[in-house]
Structures are given as C-alpha cells and as structure tokens.
Amino acid sequence: MKNIFFVTLFIFSFYLFFAESKANAQQLSRDFWHDGEVNLFSGETLKGKIKYDLDTDNIQLQYNNTIKSFSAFQVESFQFFDEVLKMPRAFYALPYKKSGNYESPTFFELLAEGYLTLLNREIITYRMMYPTGFWGWGYRPWMGTSVPVLDDSYYVLLMKEEKVVKLVDTKKDILALMQDKAREVEGFVAANRIRFDRREDLVRLFDFYNSMKPKIN
C-alpha cells in the first residue's frame, strides 16, 4: 500500500508540474494571426490577417482566401492590432548589418519616434523550470522542462545619420546618446523612477528626450 501511495503521489506531482509549466508558458504574438495591413515597396497596400516571424524577417498575409508570404525585401512596413497584447503595433523594414559587411532589410518594431527613434526586435529565449516535490519537498532536476520566454532587444535609429545601432548596455548606451540633455534626462529618470529594463518606461524616456529636440523631417 505504501508503494502504491508514493507512486500515485509521484504521478500526481508530475502532472501538476506540467500543468503549471503549460500555464506559465507565454502566449507568443508571433504564433497568432492579427488583423492589419501591409505596405509593400511596390506601392500596394494589402489588408488581412498577419502572422510574422522576426527570426527570418518574413510575414504571412491571409487575404482573399489565400495566404501569401513576403520578406523584408518586399515590405516597407506592416501594422496590426495584436490579439495577444491587445494593442496596436507597427513594424518597419530598415537596412541593418546583422553579420558580415552587408546591410539587408530587417524588421524592427517602432516604439518611440523622433530625434532618437526607439526600436525593438523581440527575441524568444528558453528558461528551464524544475518541479518541486508534492507539498514542496525538494526539487526534481531530471524533470525540468524548457519554457519559451519573450524578451526585448532594443535598437535606436539615429535619424540624422540614418543608421540603426543596437543597445548593448541599455542604460549606459541610452544615457550616452542623450548626453546633450544629461541634466534634464537624469532628473526625469529619478523623478519618474524609470527602469531601463521596462519597455513602457523607455518609451516615456524617449518621448521626453525627443520633446526637447527639433523635429527631423
């Protein structure tokens, strides 16, 4: 009876862990279709449901009972209402040197526009989750499972230079780019408790900085 009890306990604990893992896994926007429109370099604007893949810089568009694929070489921009995040999002194809000596069109999400334009490329990382025993007894390293987690990778479009640069050390790099307004920026950061690892805070900071700079056409 004792053996049966512990086997049952083990199976139940195992089931609870995987149910929890599934619940904790993020719903990823790139896995869903979203209502929006695509603006092609040819001048066409197509409306329908969009599914995007930033890893390959390709999108799929579902319209007129067909599904068509487009690469960043064909797409100037695309916008949609994100069904997961419940917010509008806009992406632009910009020249960027990923590797080697050549630039190629790359999709970036527009977060804040102005003298310094904040961009983002979401990345998917995988985090290991390990179960604890029933009622919290220890943990089971051999039962770990990999759970996808959404992270942000920030970039800045320097409008005058027409160049996209990646933020490696987010806080240090941003403050260096905004050094001409260092006193005002530092005051804003302190007064508003700006966190450099939070997207909405960075948008507020860039909007504040850009409000002090001349507009670039």
Image (cartoon, grey):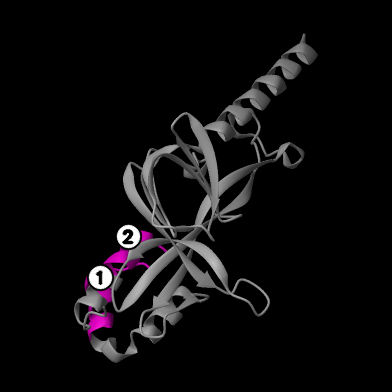
Q: Is residue 35 above or below residue 125?
A: above
Residue 180 % position (x, y): 29, 91
Per the image, label 1 sits on a secondary structure element best described as: helix
Looking at this view, name the residue that lies furthest to the top: 1
Question: Which residues make up the magenta segment?
Answer: 184-205
On residue 207, the disc is: 1
Residue 92 % position (x, y): 42, 61
Amino acid type indicated by mark 2: Glu
Q: Nearer the viewer, residue 135 or 36?
A: 36
User: Which of pointers 1 and 2 lies earlier in the amino acid sequence?
Assistant: 2
Rendering quarter of residue 182: bottom left
> Can residue 196 be seen from the camera position used here?
no
Per the image, label 2 sits on a secondary structure element best described as: helix
Q: Nearer the viewer, residue 217 or 212?
A: 217
The quadrant the N terminus occupies is: top right
Residue at position x 51%, y 71% in the image: 95
Residue 199 % position (x, y): 37, 61
